[in-house]
Image (cartoon, rainbow, N blue to C red):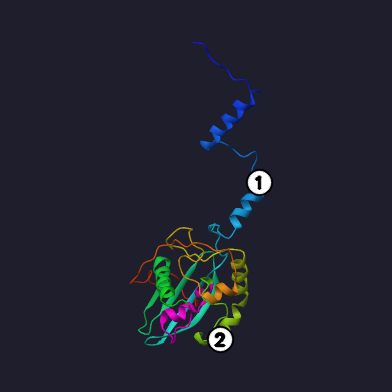
Amino acid sequence: MKRHFHPLGNWRRNVLLLAAAGSLGLTLPACSSNDESSTDENGAEASWDGQTYSQGVITEMTEVQPGEWKITAERPAGKEEVAAILHHADGKTDTLQGQALQRQMQDYSRQNPENRAQGNGMMNVLMWSGIGFMAGRYMTPNPGYYANPALVQQNQGWRTTVADERQRGRGFFGRGFSGGRTSPTAGVQESRSTLRSSPRPSFRSSAPAGRSSGFGSRGGFRGFGG
C-alpha cells in the first residue's frame, strides 16, 4: 500500500494538525515562568500552601471557682506546639490539644462568630488567650481574662511576630489537628473584625467539623513551674 507523506512545508496541513492537537489538550506552552506560578499562588483565589506560624503557644488556665476561669500562665512554644493546660477547681489537670482542642474551637467559633460572649467560661477565656490570637479570634488582647495582666505585655513580642506572619499568609495549625494543610485557621472561624483589620488573600476552608466530648491526654505538658 502506498503511504502518503505530508511535508512540513504544507502549511494548511500543519494548521489542521495543530488544531487537532489543541482539541486533545496536547498543546504545550513554549516556556514556563516562575513569576507566573508565584502570581497564581498568591492570588485571591489561591489555596493555602500549608505554611504555619514559626512559633506555637502553651496557655495555662485555672478554674478559680466552679465555671470561672482565668489565664494564669502563657508562653511561646515550638512550631505547631499548641495546647491549653487546664487546672480544674477539684485539683485535676487536663491538657487540651490536638483534635480535641481543634473541634472545641471549631464548635465555639460557629456559635460565636465574634469574641463577644460574656462571662469567664472555659472556652470563652481560651478564645481570648494566645491560642485564640493565633486562630484570628481577636487583634487586641483583653487583660481582664488574665489573672496577672502583666502576662499580656510579656508576650507582646510573640503577638507581633504572629501578626506579621499572618499578613504574609501563614496560618494556625497544631500538632494532632485533623484536616491536613487545607485551612489557614484549621477550620476555626476567624472573627469578622479580625478579617477586616488584617486583609489577606481569601482562602477556602475544608477542614472537617465535628464535636468532641473529651479532652486530650492528661498531663501531656508539664506546668511552667518545672
Question: Observer-nearest residue: 86 or 68?
Answer: 68
Residue 62 image point, x, y percent: 44, 83
Q: Would you place residue 150 above or below residue 226 in this image?
A: below
Snapshot quadrant of residue 79: bottom right
Snapshot quadrant of residue 16: top right
**Residue 219 makes an appearance in the image:** no
Task: Name which of mark 1 and mark 2 comes first in the sequence.
Answer: 1
Q: Which residues are magenta?
A: 114-133
Q: What amino acid does circle 2 point to?
A: Pro
CA separation in Å, label 1 and label 2: 51 Å
**Residue 152 makes an appearance in the image:** yes
Residue identified by numbered label 2: 149
Residue 173 image point, x, y percent: 49, 64
Snapshot quadrant of residue 159: bottom right
Residue identified by numbered label 1: 33
Q: Residue furthest top?
A: 1
Residue 41 image point, x, y percent: 59, 55
Q: Residue furthest left?
A: 213
User: Seen in the image, is 89 located left or right of residue 159?
Assistant: left
